Image: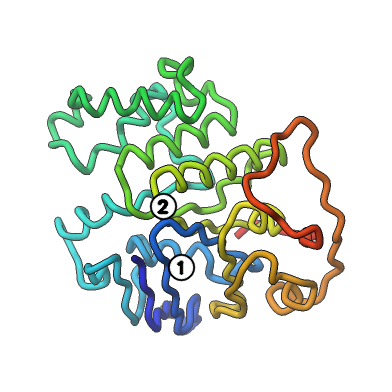
């Protein structure tokens, strides 16, 4: 579905954020990107939807070569690639419903979007999505009246109303407490399964990546140093990705949480320290 071939991002200073990245992501797969701050995780995601321009290489979404697009063609392609942001990127003065419907801006004309006159089918889908993410009661609330977890759920609904084929998720749990983080990751995982969506999730929490992703890719200094299943991560692999550190093998589930959605080896490792990307 998504294929990156020899993707490199070099800045005018000569510094490389990414070097010769080769990745193939099939439909329906949830892939987690892990690595230390500055490893290139956010840059990789933003190269896919061209918020950052790759210096060289090929990025193909199904039959479309994304690196060759511009103007209206690029805007059309971006409809298929919905983004979920760390800081939610909501418009605080708008209601929850208006923020969700803003995900349809790429499909409706300028005047309809300016006057917020969305087609009835879009409004009906927004109602369905708000119910699915657990916020049917909040549709008339302003975004700035919501908690962090609620704001992220609005961001997820806004992404899904685009009817995307690919989710690009940039640190969705960085501003959330541990319990809410698990709830948000579980929701993203379930929605990808329900809609057969592929997803790339940039995440610092290794334990969450192991629990909710099908595949983990480790980046260090802009290069892939690990690409495998969650159960293949061990202390040596984490040292390769992050450098020398003490790895805590104790994993404690949140009290009151439901059964995890996928089998996770008892030996899974929790990253003892992290930071912002």
Which quadrant of the view contains residue 7? bottom left
Where is the C terminus found, in terms of image quarters? bottom right
The residue that appears at 53% across and 70% down in the rendered structure is: 40
Quadrant assignment, res 117: top left
Is residue 238 placed above or below 268 in the rendered structure? below
The image shows residue 194 at horizontal and vertical percentages of 43, 42
Q: In this view, does 80 lie to the left or right of 117?
A: right
In which quadrant of the rendered image does the N terminus lie?
bottom left
Q: In this view, does 100 lie above or below 193?
A: above
Residue at 41%, 35% in the rendered image: 157
- Name the element at disc 1: helix
Q: Closer to the camera, 268 or 150?
A: 268
Question: Which residue lies under the disc numbered 1?
Answer: 44
Above-or-below relation of 104 to 95: below
Residue 270: x %, y % from top left: 78, 58
Q: How far apart are marks 1 and 2 (CA)?
A: 13 Å
Q: Which of marks 1 and 2 is in front?
A: 2
Q: Is residue 149 visible?
A: yes
Name the residue nearer the viewer: 21 or 127: 127
Q: Which of marks 1 and 2 is nearer the N terminus?
A: 1
Q: Which numbered dot is residue 167? A: 2
**Residue at point 36%, 49% (across, down):** 82
Crowd class of label 2 (few under 14; some 14 to 19; many from 20; radius 10 Å): many
Helix, strand or loop for disc 2:
strand
Residue 115 in view (yes/no): no
x%, y% of residue 197?
40, 51
Percent across and percent down for residue 222 are: 54, 77
Are the residues at dot 1 and dot 2 in contact (C-beta closer than 8 Å)? Answer: no
């Amino acid at each position: 579905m998504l294929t990156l071939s020899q993707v490199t991002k070099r800045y005018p200073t000569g510094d490389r954020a990414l070097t010769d990245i080769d990745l193939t992501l099939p439909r329906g797969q949830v892939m987690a990107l892990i690595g230390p701050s500055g490893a290139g995780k956010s840059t990789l995601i933003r190269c896919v939807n061209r918020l950052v321009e790759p210096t060289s290489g090929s990025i193909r979404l199904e039959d479309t070569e994304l690196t060759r697009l511009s103007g209206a063609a690029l805007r059309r392609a971006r409809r298929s690639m919905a983004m979920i942001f760390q800081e939610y990127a909501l418009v605080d003065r708008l209601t929850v419903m208006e923020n969700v419907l803003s995900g349809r801006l790429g499909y409706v004309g300028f005047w309809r979007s300016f006057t917020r006159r969305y087609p009835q089918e879009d409004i009906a889908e927004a109602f369905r999505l708000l119910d699915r993410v657990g916020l049917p009661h909040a549709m008339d609330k302003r975004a700035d009246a919501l908690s962090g977890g609620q704001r992220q759920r609005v961001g997820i609904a806004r992404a899904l109303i685009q009817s995307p084929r690919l989710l690009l998720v940039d640190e969705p749990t960085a501003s959330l407490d541990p319990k809410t983080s698990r709830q948000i990751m579980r929701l993203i995982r379930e929605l990808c399964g329900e809609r057969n969506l592929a997803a790339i999730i940039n995440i610092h929490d290794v334990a969450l990546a192991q629990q909710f992703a099908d595949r983990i890719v480790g980046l260090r200094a802009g290069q892939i140093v690990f690409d495998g299943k969650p159960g293949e991560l061990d202390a040596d692999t984490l040292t390769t990705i992050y450098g020398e550190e003490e790895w805590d093998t104790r994993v404690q589930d949140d009290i009151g949480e439901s059964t995890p959605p996928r089998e996770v080896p008892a030996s899974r490792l929790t990253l003892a320290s992290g930071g912002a990307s």
